[in-house]
Amino acid sequence: MAEEELKENIAEEPKDGATEDSAELKKLLEQERAKSEEYLDNWRRAAADFSNYKKRAEKDASEMGKFWNASLISRLLPILDDFDRAQQTIPDNLRDLTWIDGILLIARKMSMILESEGLKQIEALNKPFDPNLHEAVIHEETDQHEDGTVIAELQKGYKLNDRILRPTMVKVAKKK
């Protein structure tokens, strides 16, 4: 029995060197755990940053897709203006000719195509002047309209996907 007790005491009582080694190992283990936590936090932060970057890049690409054709559409607007002016000046005796109908059909098709791309006309007539939407080129003194009301459109304005592509040129009422 004494031999068994001696073995138990030896197993229970660590040697001085073993205690120091154990403490050192615990210290090293804690340091490694702290490093691994730091690495895990950094990885999570990098993953979140990358996810945010991806979302931002997708949003930017989507925005670019909406507005990539803005330059082309801007260059086509004078043609729409020309069609409108031509339609307004057609003499009544020529309105029934088929080639006039053909030209007006071309103008309508072009307008429909541009509308399908997101182009919308800015409504201005009889509305309050808004410098974000309108460009005032003439102020006319009058008693027939309220001050700051648009009384004539001189050139149509357009939005492309809710962004102003060209403001409407307008005549604005001014009180006498």
Image (tube, grey):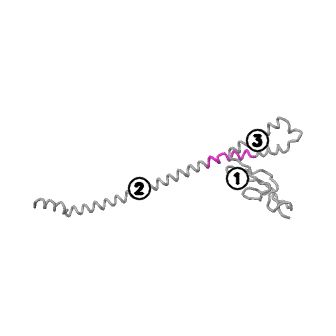
Q: Tell me which numbered mark, 1 or 3, is placed earlier along the sequence.
A: 3
Q: How many numbered tags mark residues here?
A: 3
Q: Within 10 Å of the Cα at label 3, are there few (<14), some (14-19), or many (20+) other Cα atoms?
A: some
Q: Is residue 20 above or below residue 92?
A: below
In magenta stretch: residue 151: no
Q: Which residues are magenta?
A: 63-77
Q: Which residue is mark 3?
A: 108
Q: Which residue is mark 1?
A: 164
Foreground residue among 17 and 4: 4
Q: Position of residue 113 (x, y in %)?
A: 71, 42
Q: Tell me which numbered mark, 1 or 2, is placed earlier along the sequence.
A: 2
Q: Secondary structure at mark 1?
A: strand
The answer to whether 138 appears left or right of 12 in the picture is: right
Q: What amino acid type should be assigned to the residue bearing mark 2?
A: Leu
* Disc number placed over residue 40 in the picture, else none: 2
How far apart in space, not on screen, are marks 1 and 3 (Cα)? 22 Å
Q: What amino acid type should be assigned to the residue bearing mark 1?
A: Ile
How far apart in space, not on screen, are marks 3 and 2 (Cα)? 61 Å
Q: Tell me which numbered mark, 3 or 2, is placed earlier along the sequence.
A: 2
Q: Within 10 Å of the Cα at label 1, are there few (<14), some (14-19), or many (20+) other Cα atoms?
A: some
In magenta stretch: residue 68: yes
Task: Residue at 82% x, 43% y: name it.
Answer: 87
Task: Residue at 18% x, 60% y: name it.
Answer: 11
Task: Residue at 78% x, 51% y: name it.
Answer: 155
Q: Position of residue 84 (x, y in %)?
A: 80, 45
Q: Quadrant of the C terminus?
A: bottom right
Q: Are marks 1 and 2 in contact (CB under 8 Å)?
A: no
Q: Secondary structure at mark 2?
A: helix
